[in-house]
Image: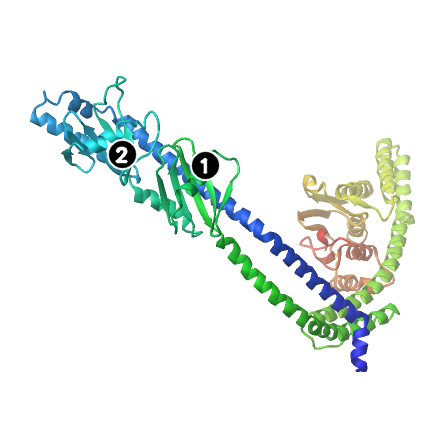
């Protein structure tokens, strides 16, 4: 009892329970609201979608009828029809047969041009004959001709119903009061029209009504109970005018209706949408909503209790370990066998503490090395031996009154000291570093004359955007002069090569000094390998350590025997590793 009370009064438990309760209530409120507004929104979407389907059908139907009327226009004054009407008595049997056969073929082509045409007929009252697209020559269908001769679809597109059939009738021009000499009648297929209407209504299980605004005839598809005459007239009147937005009319409890009016054909198309397609989905949703609400309340307390103990113990271990680190003890480690997310956190914590420990040591070491590097660089700046040699060279040139070389040498020397006296921590462009090296080489060339020659192998245009720490190339060139070629009487060679293949920059300085022993090369490699442990460093070691501190352990200096037989020092810099 006491334990349960402690859990209930625990701040974490109450927060978890309150959070879950808030989430459940939020979703419950949203669900209730959605249930209230969902029916209307769903209804609007269904109406909009079904109205679009109806509009598409009406447009398609108008286009199909328009094409049929266009065919009638093209055929109404056919030569064969004219000959059979005006010159039948003067024609011999062969001419009559040929004209009728040609007319059969013309009507047949017209029939197959539209799926809505079941038959095409030409009534000739003068001949008392009717020619059909089914290759039939029948006695004049007088009753049909009389019923249709008042309608001309070419002048006024209109679908007529006579008996059980629907027609589009076309007449040639005639004088007022005169009966037309013939008529071209397209008999429409009620089944084909009904099939297209069923394609619209099938998905929703609805029904459709097409009604004439002129003659009062109507066609219905899938309407379960026939409409009363007054009810149908009211529906047609409701949709007689074109509407910009879908208009809805309720039809009892079973249907709601949307309509589309065709001014071109004077027809009203009404689509009856069952109310059930909107209500059924929401009824199921309501049932699931009540069931989920009951289950949510039942599981809420159990789930909160389980979450409390699932997270409490692992979190407590993490908190204890963090407090240990806060006291400055970096030797803490969380032992575990977990493979879940807490196991991942424990592993990352242990790795983080280990990295922090190394970073602290690295920061301390870096501060010391930076100070040492600055001291070494200061030594380069005030190297008395180099300065003494420079003054001695100037003195010799003055003695022989070599003013031109004195001027050049003084300019090179001034540029040299101006560059090395800049901020030592400042990075410079690679081209600026190379210009400084060029000044140094010019100084040494005046000193050594033709005894030592320098080759430069690089493409300045490819190096314009590169930035490196200052004074990392010149010390290696100086090393080649001082340690590699100082005893050379003639034929000395220093080669500087630079290759840039992003993101790696490779700078190689090599000489042809002949006194490089294998022991000395091995010793230099060893010193470069443990440069971070030594208190004192030579110039090449200083450069190596500065590069490693800035660009990481993959960067630095490697040494080997050059193909020229002297020392080859290669500066490797991974630019993407800069810190």
> Looking at the image, is 579 positioned above or below residue 209?
below
Asked whether, in this view, residue 201 is left or right of residue 513, the answer is left
Colouring scheme, one of rainbow, by chain, secondary structure, one colour: rainbow
Left-right relation of 180 to 383: left
Front residue of 194/536: it is 194
How far is mark 2 from mark 1, CA to CA?
29 Å
Q: Which mark is residue 237?
A: 1
Tell me: residue 536, above or below residue 161: below
State which quarter of the image contains the N terminus: bottom right
Determine if residue 432 is in view: yes
Q: Position of residue 290 (x, y in %)?
A: 61, 65
> Farthest residue toward the left?
93
Question: Which quadrant of the structure image shows residue 340?
Answer: bottom right
**Dot 2, crowdedness within 10 Å: few (<14), some or many (≥20)?**
many
Considering the image in quadrants, where does the C terminus appear?
Answer: bottom right
Considering depth in this image, is 152 or 459 the residue closer to the camera? Answer: 152
Secondary element under disc 2, as helix, strand or loop, is strand
Residue at image location 36% in from the left, 40% down from the top? 218
Of residues 310 and 99, the one drawn nearer to the viewer in this rendering: 99
Query: Which x, y percent locates residue 251?
Result: 47, 47
């Amino acid at each position: 009892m006491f334990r349960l009370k402690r859990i209930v009064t625990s701040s974490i438990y109450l927060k978890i329970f309150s959070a879950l309760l808030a989430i459940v209530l939020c979703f419950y409120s949203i669900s209730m609201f959605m249930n209230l507004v969902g029916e209307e929104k769903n209804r609007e979407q269904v109406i909009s979608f079904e109205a679009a389907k109806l509009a598409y059908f009406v447009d398609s139907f108008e286009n199909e009828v328009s094409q049929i009327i266009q065919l009638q226009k093209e055929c109404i004054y056919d030569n064969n029809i004219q000959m059979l009407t005006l010159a039948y008595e003067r024609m011999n049997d062969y001419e009559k047969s040929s004209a009728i056969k040609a007319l059969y073929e013309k009507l047949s082509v017209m029939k197959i041009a539209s799926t809505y045409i079941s038959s095409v007929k030409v009534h000739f009252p003068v001949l008392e004959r009717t020619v059909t697209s089914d290759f039939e020559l029948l006695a004049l269908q007088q009753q049909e001709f009389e019923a249709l001769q008042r309608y001309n679809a070419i002048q006024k597109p209109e679908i007529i119903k006579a008996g059980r059939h629907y027609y589009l009738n076309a007449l040639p021009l005639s004088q007022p009061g005169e009966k037309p000499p013939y008529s071209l009648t397209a008999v429409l297929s009620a089944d084909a029209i009904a099939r297209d209407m069923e394609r619209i209504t099938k998905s929703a299980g609805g029904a459709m009504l097409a009604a004439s605004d002129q003659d009062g005839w109507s066609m219905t598809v899938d309407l379960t109970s026939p409409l009363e005459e007054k009810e149908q007239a009211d529906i047609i009147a409701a949709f007689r005018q074109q509407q910009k937005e879908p208009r809805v009319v309720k039809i009892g409890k079973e249907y709601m209706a949307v309509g589309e009016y065709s001014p071109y054909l004077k027809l009203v198309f009404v689509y009856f949408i069952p109310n059930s397609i909107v209500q059924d989905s929401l009824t199921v949703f309501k049932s699931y909503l009540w069931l989920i609400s009951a289950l949510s309340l039942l599981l809420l307390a159990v789930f909160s209790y389980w979450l409390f103990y699932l997270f409490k113990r692992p979190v407590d271990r993490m908190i204890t370990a963090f407090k240990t680190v806060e006291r400055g003890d970096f030797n803490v480690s969380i032992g575990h066998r977990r493979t879940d997310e807490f196991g991942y956190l424990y592993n990352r914590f242990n790795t983080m503490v280990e990295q922090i420990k190394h970073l602290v040591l690295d920061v301390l070491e870096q501060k010391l090395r930076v100070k040492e590097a600055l001291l070494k660089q200061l030594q380069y700046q005030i190297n008395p031996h180099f300065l003494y040699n420079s003054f001695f060279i100037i003195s010799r040139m003055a003695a022989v009154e070599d003013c031109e070389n004195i001027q050049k040498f003084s300019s090179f020397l001034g540029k040299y000291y101006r560059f090395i006296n800049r901020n030592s921590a400042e990075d410079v462009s690679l081209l600026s570093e190379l210009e400084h090296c060029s000044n140094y080489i010019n100084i040494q060339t005046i000193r050594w004359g033709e005894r030592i020659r320098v080759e430069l192998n690089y493409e300045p245009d490819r190096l314009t955007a590169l930035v490196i720490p200052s004074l990392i190339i010149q010390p290696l060139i100086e090393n080649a002069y001082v340690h590699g070629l100082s005893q050379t009487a003639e034929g000395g060679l220093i080669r500087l090569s630079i290759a840039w293949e992003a993101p790696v920059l490779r700078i190689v300085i090599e000489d042809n000094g002949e006194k490089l022993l294998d022991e000395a090369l091995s010793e230099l490699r060893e010193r470069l390998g443990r440069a971070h442990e030594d208190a004192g460093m030579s110039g090449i070691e200083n450069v190596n350590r500065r590069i490693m501190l800035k660009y990481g352990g993959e960067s630095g200096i490697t040494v080997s025997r050059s193909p020229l037989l002297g020392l080859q020092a290669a500066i490797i810099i991974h630019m993407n590793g800069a810190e």
